[in-house]
Image: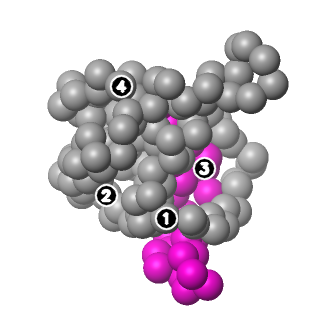
Amino acid sequence: MKAVVQRVLGSSVEVDKEVISRIGRGITALIAVETGDSEAQISKMAEKLVMLRIFEDDDGKMNKSLLETGGAVMAISNFTVAGDCLKGKRPSYMSAERPEKAAPLFEKLLKKIAEYGVEVKTGRFGADMKVNIINDGPVTVIVST
């Protein structure tokens, strides 16, 4: 499982010109379920997302996690995060899990994040989404399990 995580002031998802979810301060995570991912990766990713220390403390250092700051998670399924650009000019998505296997794992990830007491919003799996992100910093990191 792999994610591109951005610290955000706000984020929203639009499908068919309708905003279907929105968060304020927190993180937006573009998440790819990869072939072979299991419950172990779900637990690791959930823990990393809520405990990633990318929020500033009183001294302006990135020392606080989402759990400490009270923000929300906008989790977006995004198979292109699994893209491999090492060869040629076109990314290969061979490591991305098939949708019928990825969707239930992604749903389990959302539930696991919520178990930490964090508000979780999402888009629509497999849909053409317009994701609006107000990156704070900008702070963007890649998280992998």
Question: Which comes sooner in the sequence, label 1 or label 4?
Answer: 4
Q: Secondary structure at mark 2?
A: loop
SS category of the residue bearing label 3: strand
Q: Label 1 crowding class (10 Å Cα cut-off): few <14, some 14-19, many 20+?
A: few
Residue 10 lies in quadrant: bottom right
Q: In this rendering, which labeled residue sits more in front, label 3 or label 4?
A: 4
Question: How crowded is the residue under tag 3: few (<14 C-alpha within 10 Å), some, or many (20+)?
Answer: many
Report how far apart the C-alphas of labels 1 and 4 lie in the structure.
20 Å
- Give the magenta part as a residue range: 1-29
In what quadrant of the picture does the C terminus appear? top left
Callout 1, which amino acid? Ala
Mark with earlier residue (1, 2): 2
Q: Is residue 91 left or right of residue 53?
A: right
Where is residue 118 drawn, in percent x and y? 31, 58
**Alpha carbon of mark 1 to alpha carbon of mark 2: how far?**
24 Å
Q: Is residue 27 above or below residue 101?
A: below
Q: Amino acid at mark 3?
A: Arg
Residue with the most extreme top position: 87
Few, some or many residues within 10 Å of mark 4 (<14, 14–19, 20+): some
Give the residue at mark 1. Answer: 127
Depth check, front residue: 22 or 66: 22
Mark 3 or mark 2: whose residue is earlier in sequence: 3
Circle number at residue 118: 2
**Which amino acid, by three-letter code, is at mark 4?**
Thr
Name the residue that disc number 4 marks.
35
